[in-house]
Amino acid sequence: MNWKKWTVIVVSTLFMIGNLYLIYKKDSEIKRLSFVDTWTTVREQNLVESQTDAGLITPIEEEYIYYGENTGDLKAFLVKEGDRVEENTPILELSSVDIDAAIAQRELEISRLEDDIEALEDNIDSLDDLLSDIESSTTDENQSSNTIMANSLEIEIYEKELQVSRLEAELDKQETALASMDESLSSLTINSKIAGIVKEIRHDLNNPIVTITSNDIQVEATLTEKEIPTLEEGMKVVISSSLHKDKLEGTISTISTLPKTEPKEKKETLYSYTIQLNEQPSSSIPHGSNVDLKIITNEINDALTVLAKSIKQKGVKSYLYVMKANGTIERRQIETGLQLNHVREIKANAEEGEKVVLAANTLRNKTKFYTSFKPEKLKKKDFRKMGKRQALKTALKGFVS
């Protein structure tokens, strides 16, 4: 047996003998000491308070396509139920037969109006020339007759110009109508405004004739009237699905104040809330599938915490018994916060790493304390680092103390 083992045995034996002597000695000071059996440490950690729920995967939005007889006859559906569509995918095709006939009629009317206006303008030019000739050939002898003729021509010119104005107004009206028809002709194919799946097609033409659900998903869940105060919009949510390997994160986006079903007296009313995902999943999750929810109702990062059973109560005040480096116990009033399971937050009057009494034979403020000697905690490497002389010196110092 080498000197290291002998050193451990000797130190342990002397320490135990010394402790037994001090304990049983009459009027021993050891009786006024606190024996600390177990202790804990003030730690810094994140505290997360949560509650669980269940929800369903639903689409973020749905697009409804309506059919009106004034948009043209329905020629064909270009998709079927269950088809995946992208934005601007053609969904419906309308017939252009009626619109083509109406366009031809408008164009014919516009051509007639343009011819009538041109003929009137030519007639006005001729009347203007005739009026100029009369005015230039007027003499004292024919002044009376020429004046009558000139007045008659001016009246006729005015009437012709009035007719031109009316025809031009009608022409503008017809051209506007034609432009509208051309626009209708260009929109004979109705396209999807969102990317998603064709959920329903109504071949009976009852509106909406096509319903498209978006690819982007959200979560819908139900809560009771008693649970409403426990949730707030903006709370973080962790979402788990058996159909998706990774957990998803989101936030509560809306909490409905309208009942899901018809309320009834003496029965708890149900409401709905929705959860917006922070990111859409990399792989699709079927609409209507069930998911598990973990709702973060309270979260404190980098909180100072201690085991709740180490906190002593006296009335409304809370205390810790802190083991000081000088070998004494300090009773310290603290301010507590959130408690989760066996851990309690300390808001004030504690520092990370401080040792706190869990169990002791007696607890008094400013008393000295001692703990059990545990030889199994001593390791060869610790003595090796110290060296022979320092190890022996430390052992003797501990025994004398």
Image: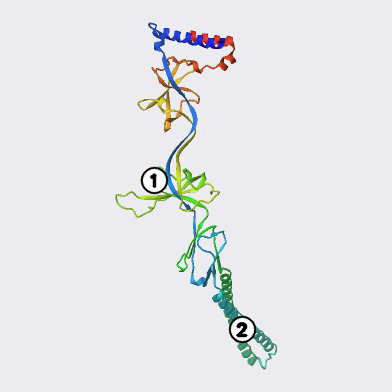
Tell me residue 221's x, y (percent).
43, 49
Give the mark nearest the N terminus, 2 or 1.
2
Identify the secondary structure beneath mark 2.
helix
Q: Nearer the viewer, residue 282 or 9?
A: 9
Q: Nearer the viewer, residue 255 or 33?
A: 33
Up the image or down, 46 lies above or below 118; here it is above
In which quadrant of the rendered view does residue 151 lie? bottom right
Q: For label 1, count other residues whose C-alpha is less than 10 Å away and answer few (under 14), some (14-19) or many (20+).
A: some
List the single residue furthest toward the front. 1
Tell me residue 298's x, y (percent).
45, 38
Up the image or down, 189 lies above or below 56; here it is below
- Residue under label 1, please give it: 228
Q: Residue at x 43, y 32 (%)?
A: 337
- The amino acid at mark 1 is Ile
Up the image or down, 99 lies above or below 142; here it is above
- Residue 317 shows in this picture: yes
Q: Nearer the viewer, residue 28 or 140?
A: 28
- The amino acid at mark 2 is Asp
Q: Residue at x 55, y 76 (%)?
A: 97
- Residue 401 shows in this picture: no
Up the image or down, 65 lies above or below 124; here it is above
Tell me residue 212's x, y (percent).
50, 60
Tell me residue 55's x, y (percent).
44, 48
List the single residue furthest toward the top. 26
- Residue under label 2, please give it: 116
Identify the secondary structure beneath mark 1.
helix
Q: Nearer the viewer, mark 2 or mark 1?
A: 1
Q: For label 2, count other residues whose C-alpha is less than 10 Å away and answer few (under 14), some (14-19) or many (20+).
A: some
